[in-house]
Image (cartoon, grey):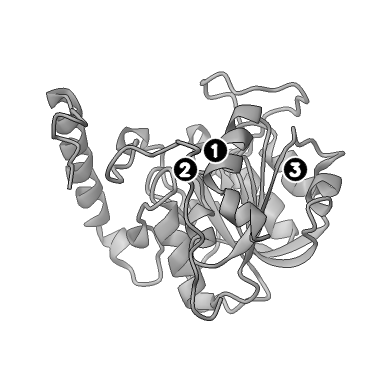
């Protein structure tokens, strides 16, 4: 077993210190009384393939409501090595990934070729806009009821959510802009040519996102500890296991980007000649 501190994967003293301080901070935050409440999701956060702690929260949501279709759609899936649905795929789920970067889709086609060939995954290079999002998703053979929709395109996220009609997710994971706190309603003006420039100009505030999702029949049930993603469950599901009220003021988590990159073990392997094996899952 090779560890990141070995010569083949050297870790600088500064990086080791940063990771240790991040873990100390994470534990201190989770020790607060607010996060100890059983109905809250944030303490269930864990990383497998997600950027931060989203994998654990998604798993806990479906532990509470149960998976039904075991299907997903992810907008802004990246290269598949770090997103919100890769872990589900490897557990026997099926779904669709859409990303606007051809380099990312090329990596997906290499690393996940067994899943693509088996029909458990479809992937497309598409720059999603409100006037093409339904067509893009339907063209991949995904329509109707699904278990999970994840949206993280670093810009026009809310416009895509408002325009999407061809699928009916039970759970939605959507990025929010924590800069605006829990109560300010703000969204980035729609820009068809937007490319995130690394600044705070992206997406929408949690309050605006929660308003839109409420109108679409979803309840805000939590946010992740890093303060990047919000989690919504359809109101026709049993919400008794989740912390009410389902408002931005109740569930907002501030930006804690210092917790990233969330330590997840060894560096990722993007080599196309070492694709993920097709995992057989009992009962899938």
- Does residue 22 sit above or below 238 in this rendering? above
The x, y position of residue 178, in whole percent, is 49, 37
Residue sticking out furthest to the front? 273
Closest to the observer, 83 or 93: 93
Say few, some or many: other residues with alpha carbon within 10 Å of mark 1 (under 14 / 14 to 19 / 20 or more). many
Of callouts 3 and 1, which one flags the residue occurring earlier in the amino acid sequence? 1
Q: Name the quadrant containing residue 227.
A: top left
Q: Is residue 173 visible?
A: no
Q: Is residue 199 visible?
A: yes
Q: Which mark is residue 160?
A: 3
Assign a secondary structure to mark 1: loop
State the CA–CA distance, disc 3 to disc 1.
20 Å
Callouts 3 and 2 close, C-beta under 8 Å = no
Q: Name the quadrant containing residue 22.
A: top left
Callouts 3 and 1 close, C-beta under 8 Å = no
Q: Which mark is residue 281?
A: none
Assign a secondary structure to mark 3: helix
Assign a secondary structure to mark 2: loop
């Amino acid at each position: 077993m090779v560890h990141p501190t070995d010569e083949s994967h050297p870790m600088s003293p500064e990086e080791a210190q940063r990771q240790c301080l991040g873990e100390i901070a994470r534990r201190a935050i989770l020790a607060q009384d607010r996060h100890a409440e059983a109905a809250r999701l944030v303490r269930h956060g864990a990383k497998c393939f997600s950027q931060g702690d989203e994998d654990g929260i998604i798993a806990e949501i479906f532990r509470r409501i149960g998976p039904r279709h075991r299907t997903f759609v992810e907008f802004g899936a990246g290269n598949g090595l770090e997103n919100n649905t890769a872990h589900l795929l490897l557990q026997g789920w099926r779904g669709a990934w859409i990303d606007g970067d051809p380099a990312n889709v090329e990596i997906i086609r290499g690393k996940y070729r067994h899943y693509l060939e088996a029909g458990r995954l479809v992937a497309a290079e598409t720059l999603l806009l409100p006037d093409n999002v339904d067509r893009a998703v339907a063209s991949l053979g995904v329509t109707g009821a699904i278990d999970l929709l994840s949206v993280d395109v670093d810009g026009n996220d809310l416009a895509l959510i408002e325009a999407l009609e061809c699928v009916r997710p039970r759970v939605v994971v959507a990025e929010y802009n924590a800069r605006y706190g829990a109560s300010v309603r703000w969204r980035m003006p729609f820009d068809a040519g937007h490319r995130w420039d690394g600044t705070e100009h992206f997406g929408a505030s949690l309050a605006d996102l929660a308003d839109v999702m409420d109108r679409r029949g979803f309840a805000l049930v939590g946010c992740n500890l890093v303060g990047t993603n919000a989690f919504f469950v359809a109101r026709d599901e049993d919400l008794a296991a989740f912390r009410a009220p389902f408002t931005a003021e109740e569930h907002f988590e501030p930006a804690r980007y210092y917790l990233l990159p969330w330590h997840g073990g060894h560096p990722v392997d993007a080599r196309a000649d070492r694709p993920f094996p097709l995992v057989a899952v009992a009962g899938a």
